[in-house]
Image: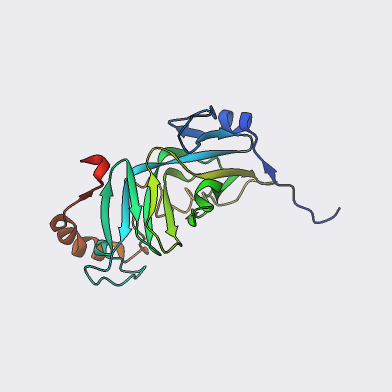
Amino acid sequence: MSGVTNVAILSDAQIQREIVIRPFADGTPRPGVISYGLSSYGYDVRVGRHFKVFTNVYGAVVDPKNFSPTAFVDIEGDYCLIPPNSFALAESLEYFEIPRDLLAICVGKSTYARCGIIVNITPLEPEWRGKITLEISNTTPLPAKIYANEGIAQIIFLRAEQVCRVSYADKRGKYQDQKGLTLPFVLGTELAASSRNDKVSEDRPKVLSPAAE
């Protein structure tokens, strides 16, 4: 049929063979744990121990061109409690390297989705590499508990019919090789925001969850 584009979804064997994932986990069932690791046509990524939870204590404004770290409270521990109708950023435990002919997309895990917890990840573009920044929304009127080092979302890998002309690495994408939990920024504005916010970040104490104390 004319005009049809062939896009293939990678299987478990292809994912294990072609995608750099560190540390890699198989899909062995783990009792009492939200599942993670290799699945039939995807990889269930784990969330790390570092979270940034929105707060209005400091009166910050959410501005993608001038994002202030005072919009968040840092939490580190075995779990994170997200307040009702609030939002958190987190980082994947795994590091990824996406090949040039692939695009990866994220879908939420049913266990969290059925609790009203929505996880979003923007597409992982060709030749992007790093740990994934996870966006987690608590849509419920109750606090939501997120378990570190357990599954949080599934990554599905799509192979294009043709290799792209320009990859994320070619564009020198701003989130390439991001280290730590990276906040949003717009190129050309991040240096001024960084110098202005460094002092604020130093003055703010880190909050530990009860599990980390």
Q: Camera-side residue: 133 or 57?
A: 57
Closer to us: 44 or 34: 34
Q: Quadrant of residue 68?
A: bottom left
Kindly tell me whether residue 202 is visible in this rendering. Answer: yes
Question: Residue 77 location in percent, x, y?
Answer: 28, 42
Q: Residue at x 56, y 48 (%)?
A: 110
Q: Is residue 106 toward the left or the right of residue 138 in the image?
A: right
In the rendering, at what x and y percent does residue 152 appear?
47, 45
Q: Is residue 35 left or right of residue 213?
A: right
Q: Could you tell me which residue is drawn at 51 percent across and 49 percent down?
A: 124
**Quick one: 163 or 193, which is closer to the camera?**
193
Q: Residue at 52% across / 46% down in the picture?
A: 111
Which residue occupies 48% across, 34% down?
A: 21
Question: Is residue 126 visible from the viewing direction of this image?
Answer: no
Determine whether, in the image, residue 46 is placed left or right of residue 43: left
* Image quadrant in which the C terminus is located: top left
- Tell which residue pokes out farthest to the right in this image: 1
Give the vertical position of 27 relative to 189 (above or below).
above
